[in-house]
Amino acid sequence: MIRASCLCGGVEFEIRGELLRASHCHCSMCRKAHGAAFGTYAVAKKADVRVVSGEALIAAYGSSPGVRRTFCIRCGSTLQWLKASRPDLVDIALGILDDDPGIRPACHIYVGSKAPWYDIGDALPQHLQGQP
């Protein structure tokens, strides 16, 4: 089991089961949602993710057609990325994990819109758009 929580601790998750893949997303929406050079997410089966506490603190923002991003209304922590066309999966912001997820990001995606002030310094594959 992997535990996760927001900055204020009001929202807590449990993730049972393994995470499927992880990546660093450089799209402008992830950069703005995270206030950083990129957002790092891992994919989990929705059935494996359970809100332990703070469900009333979770709000969602429709950032683009068919996509909702969740966050804590008290502290603003980015929590999840949800896509309507993938109702059985949820992308979890790795920054909220309290435990080692057991996987590492495998690539950088949407580097075609990365922040001009950030230079990618690792050897991970880079994709101009999403994952192939």
Image (spheres, rainbow, N blue to C red):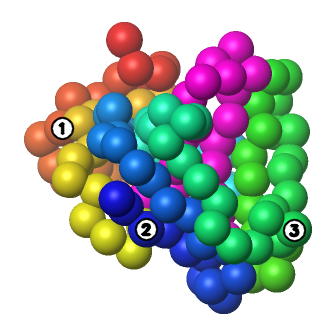
Residue found at x 78% / y 39%: 68
Residue found at x 59% / y 54%: 50
Q: Is residue 34 visible to the viewer in this orientation of the structure? A: no
Q: Quadrant of residue 52?
A: bottom right
Residue on which disc 3 sits: 56
Depth check: give the residue in front, 105 or 2: 2
Q: Is residue 74 left or right of residue 82?
A: right
| Crowdedness near tag 3: few (<14), some (14–19) or many (≥20) residues, C-alpha within 10 Å | few
Q: Amino acid at mark 1?
A: Leu
Depth check: give the residue in front, 66 or 24: 66
Alpha carbon of mark 2 to alpha carbon of mark 1: how far? 26 Å
Alpha carbon of mark 3 to alpha carbon of mark 1: how far? 38 Å
N-terminal of the two: label 3 or label 1? 3
Q: Is residue 53 left or right of residue 61?
A: left
| Crowdedness near tag 2: few (<14), some (14–19) or many (≥20) residues, C-alpha within 10 Å | some
Residue 69 lies, with reference to residue 86, above or below; the image says below
Q: Is residue 94 left or right of residue 76?
A: left
Query: Which of the two marks, 2 or 1, is nearer to us in this view?
Result: 2
Residue 102 location, x and y as percent? 20, 53
Q: Amino acid at mark 3?
A: Ala
- Callout 3: SS: helix
Residue found at x 23% / y 36%: 106
Residue on which disc 2 sits: 3
Residue 15's disc number: none
Query: Which of the two marks, 3 or 1, is nearer to us in this view?
Result: 3
Residue 53 lies, with reference to residue 103, above or below; the image says below
User: Which residues lie in the magenta part?
Assistant: 76-95
Alpha carbon of mark 3 to alpha carbon of mark 2: how far? 18 Å
Q: Amino acid at mark 2?
A: Arg
- Give the total of numbered labels: 3
Residue on which disc 1 sits: 124
